[in-house]
Image (spheres, rainbow, N blue to C red):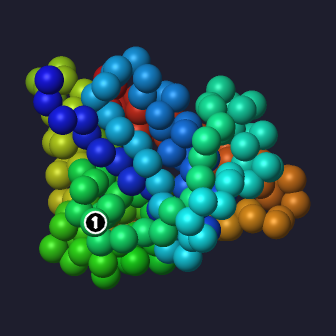
Amino acid sequence: MREPFRVLVVCTGNVHRSPLAERLLTFRLASASGRFQVSSAGTAAANGTPMDPVAATLLTEMGGEPSGAAARRLTAGLVNGAALVLGAATEHREAAVRLSPVHGLGHAFTLREFARLLHKDDAAGLTDPTERAVALTAGAATRRGAGAAEAWDDDLVDPYGASEEEARACAARIAEAVERIVAVVLD
C-alpha cells in the first residue's frame, strides 16, 4: 500500500482552529481508510497543551473526536513532510512557507483558500483519493492569486477566548471548507 497523503493544519496555538479542522478532516475522510493522515501544529504552540474545551465541544457536536489532541510547535520538518499544508489564516500559510520556501510555495494554502481554489476537473479520470488529492493540490497551486476579490474571506479569525457565538461561527466556516474539500477529493 502506498504512503498516505499527509495534510498538516496550522494555526497559532494549535488548541482551537487547527485541531478542530484536523479532527473534522480526519472524521470526514474516514471512508478513505488509511489513505490520508491529518495532523496539526501551531506557530506559537506550547507542546502538549490540550485542545480548547470550547473547540472540543464544537468538534464533538460535528461528529469528530477530540480526545488525545495535544498542541505541538510548527517545524520545517512538519511542513516538508506534508503533501498539503492548510493554515487557519494567511499568517499561518506564510509561516509554513518561511520554514520551507521551496516545498511550501506549492503546498501551503489557507484552509478556505484551498477550498475556494479546488476544481474537480483537475482530478478528472482519477479514482484513487490520494491521486486525486495530489492533482487537486497541484491545480489549486496554479490558481493561486486568482479570485483575489474573494481572498478577503480566506482567513479564520481566532476564536480562542472569544464568545461562544464567535467560536461557533468559526467552527461553521471550518466545517464549510472541510466539506468542500472532502466532497471534491472523494468525488
Q: Position of residue 82 (x, y in %)?
A: 28, 54
172 to 43, vertically: above or below: above
- Under tag 1, what secondary structure? helix
Q: Position of residue 7 (x, y in %)?
A: 35, 48
Check the picture and name the quadrant holding the N terminus: top left
In this view, the residue farthest toward the bottom is 98
In this view, the residue farthest toward the front is 48
Q: Is residue 91 visible?
A: yes
Please tell me which residue is depicted at 60% across the width and 46% down the height of the picture: 69
Question: Hey, which quadrant is residue 105 in on the image?
Answer: bottom left
Question: Hey, which quadrant is residue 65 in on the image?
Answer: top right
Check the picture and name the quadrant holding the C terminus: top left
Q: Nearer the viewer, residue 29 or 123?
A: 29
Disc 1 residue crowd, few under 14, some 14–19, many 20+, Cα 10 Å:
few
Q: Which residue is mark 1?
A: 77
Q: Position of residue 128 (x, y in %)?
A: 18, 23
Side (left or right) of 79 relative to 134: right
Please tell me which residue is depicted at 24% across the width and 75% down the height of the picture: 100
Q: Amino acid at mark 1?
A: Gly
Please tell me which residue is depicted at 55% across the width and 47% down the height of the picture: 21
